[in-house]
Image (spheres, grey):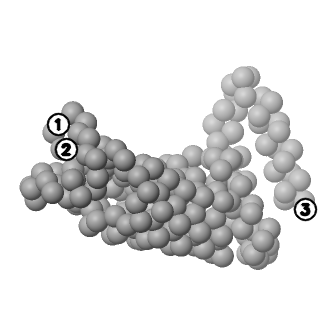
Amino acid sequence: MEIKYKFNNDTNVYIANSMNEVLELDTEKYNNIIYLDCYNCELTKLPVLPDSLRQLYCNNNKLLVLPTLANGLQTLYCYDNLLCCLPRIPKSLRYLHCGVNRLTFLPTLPENLQCIYCYENLFNIFPRLPNNLNPSIEVTKAVAHYIEKCGDKEKYHIENTIAANKIRDWFTDCKYNPKYKYCRDRVNKDYDELMSG
């Protein structure tokens, strides 16, 4: 077991042999941790997280729940655990990787979220995706699986139309660049099929 962590205003990476060793730091040091990597440590729970935390990598463990997330957290990798739900996601979060869990829903996603991987879950409810989100095959697979298994196709027709319009807008930005002609033609064809179907 190897747990890595960094402090605010310090470029060094420190290594602990257990979570208890990290918790034995004095309060001031613990509260200045900005990076915590406890990947693949067979953890079943995490302690109260420091408010200063910006990056948390707790993937490949046996976690059932996550503690309250720091308000300034920007990166959360919690994939390949046993999570059934996630705590409130802070507005500062940019990257979320929560695939391979038992999640039945996602909390409200912040508008500034740029990337999400949420494949291989058990979604009953899927939230509205933020406008800033980069398109990802992994997000598409999760949404498609949800709609296929338990979604209301009429309800998601509106969301699909919004997504198609967003893709159309992206390609409109590339309108005069010949490099993107194939992509634009393909999207236009798929868009026409979606809208006529």
User: Is residue 156 at least partly visible in the picture?
Assistant: yes
User: Looking at the image, is mark 3 or mark 2 earlier in the sequence?
Assistant: 2
Q: How dense is the environment of label 3, judged by Cα within 10 Å: few (below 14), some, or many (20 and up)?
A: few
Contact check, label 2 and label 1, Cβ < 8 Å: yes
The residue sitting at 82% across, 44% down in the picture is 188
Q: Nearer the viewer, residue 32 or 176?
A: 32
Q: Is residue 126 above or below residue 12?
A: below
Left or right, 30 with respect to 90, comes to: left
Q: Is residue 6 above or below residue 79?
A: above
Mark 3, residue position: 197
User: Is residue 130 at least partly visible in the picture?
Assistant: no
- Residue 114: x, y in percent? 49, 49
**In the image, which disc is placed on residue 172?**
none
Q: Mark 2 belongs to which amino acid?
A: Phe
Q: Mark 1 belongs to which amino acid?
A: Asp
Mark 2, residue position: 7
- Residue 30: x, y in percent? 16, 55
Q: Where is the C terminus found, in terms of image quarters?
A: bottom right
Mark 1, residue position: 10
Q: Nearer the viewer, residue 119 or 196?
A: 119
The residue sitting at 17% across, 36% down in the picture is 10
Dividing the picture into quadrants, the one containing residue 88 is bottom left
Q: Secondary structure at mark 1?
A: loop
User: Looking at the image, is mark 3 or mark 1 earlier in the sequence?
Assistant: 1
Q: Mark 3 belongs to which amino acid?
A: Gly
Contact check, label 3 and label 2, Cβ < 8 Å: no
Q: Secondary structure at mark 3?
A: loop
Q: State the CA–CA distance, disc 2 to disc 1.
A: 5 Å
Label count reads 3
Q: Secondary structure at mark 2?
A: strand
